[in-house]
Image (spheres, rainbow, N blue to C red):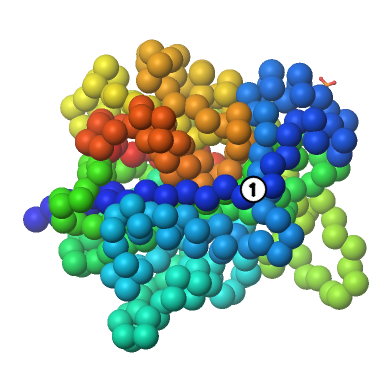
Amino acid sequence: MKIPCYICGLGSYVPSHSVTNGDMEKLVQTSDEWIVSRTGIRERHFLAEGEQVSDAGAAAARAALEDARLSPDAVTHVFVATCTPEYLSPSTACVIAGKLGLPSSSGRGAAVMCLDFNAACTGFVYGLELARSVLQGSPEAVVLLIAAEALSRRMNFADRSTCVLFGDAAGAVALRSCPEGGLWEVRDVTCASDGSLCELIKIGGGTARSVAEGDVLGPDFFISMQGQAVFRHAVRSMTEESQHILERNGLGVDDVELFIPHQANLRIIQAVGERLGLEPAKVFVNLANYGNTSAATLPLAMCDARKEGVLRPGMKVLLTSFGGGMTWGSVLLT
Ligand code: UT7
């Protein structure tokens, strides 16, 4: 029997420290005109010194649980999509669970499964598929899916082609199988990848290189990207994956009430919207205020769209994303 999966709460967190294009002009040789015309980004937000990706993730998680009217004690699984984890170990999921007070004093929290996974900017899509699988096996589960990123901590401020693009943020959803309190059903998810393209976007700091105390950090420690190749792949993969999920659910593009794509570049978003034949009013865009926050863009966009009143419970919503790996995928919410 197919067990349904409902999003029953939604939350986000954006650090207060805003960095405008004007601020970026003081750091690298760039201009507000170049950044806006090539990307659509006007400002991004960076974690404050001492503020961690787990703080952002915990704040988004608390907001999602409050929205779902659930106590942290009810959570059975904490999944964190991130390509900028706080440590190689422990997992950011364990750190966040600790900040949420799990395990709880009742001891129930000791049964919580905590897991980080990395599908780069596609993390939220992959996470919804993970949540669906968990609920299929354990219908009583309460899954907290958090997408949290601290990209500012791996930005190369000597590389103007990447450092202007990214920002920090977190988004979270609470998922259950029971329809009461459900905002949307996660009707279908597709996840794809092509590891032969793994060189196109990289973030260093892993075990690929041995380091000794006192070593000077090289460019391989930071984000590097082949922008134009990624751009082409992004447009093709998000368009095809969106068509694929609609087709396999017997839907046409006119059935989509709101399209929320990964917020990386306004030109990519517009190209995908045009290729799909979507009217621009159905395409949600909020990247001007945040830049590309990787896995966090989709839940953050969902929160903003809901606040603006354009995303309402039960609407037919198409989400799509792409990212390092390469990875990509789509989600159909109803
Ligand atoms: O979540 C996945 C993350 N990745 C992406 O979504 C990235 C996808 N790619 C892109 O969004 C675009 O390729 C970029 C925004 C990264 C770059 O835009 P582009 O239109 O592909 O520019 P380009 O790389 O072809 O560079 C054009 C020019 C170059 O100068 P020359 O060689 O023509 O003289 C660059 O050096 O723009 C220059 N440039 C800049 N100029 C001012 C590159 N970065 C900047 C900058 N400010 N920040």
Q: How many marks?
A: 1
* Quarter of the figure that contains the C terminus: top left
Image position, residue 302 (x, y; %): 41, 38
Along the line of sight, the residue nearer the viewer: 76 or 21 = 21
Q: In the drawing, does residue 210 fall left or right of residue 147?
A: right
- Where residue 65 sits, quadrant-wise, is bottom left
Apparent side of residue 218 relative to residue 260 in the rendered image (left or right)? right
**What residue sits 77% from the left and 24% below the top?**
32
Q: For this rendering, which residue is in front, 62 or 121?
A: 62
The image quarter in which residue 241 lies: top left
Query: Which residue: 50% across, 68% down?
Result: 96
* Coordinates of residue 188 in the picture (x, y in percent): 26, 42
Q: Is residue 47 left or right of residue 278?
A: right
Type of amino acid at the residue the image marks with label 1: Ser
- Side of 53 relative to 192 (left or right): right
Above or below, comparing residue 291 to residue 236 in the picture? below
Residue at the spot of label 1? 16
Residue at 82% across / 39% down in the picture?
A: 159
**Res 116 seen here:** yes
**In the rendered image of this protein, does residue 284 appear above or below residue 148?**
above
Question: Dot 1, crowdedness within 10 Å: few (<14), some or many (≥20)?
Answer: few
Q: Position of residue 8 (x, y in %)?
A: 27, 51
Identify the image quadrant of the N terminus.
bottom left
Q: Is residue 169 above or below residue 95?
A: above
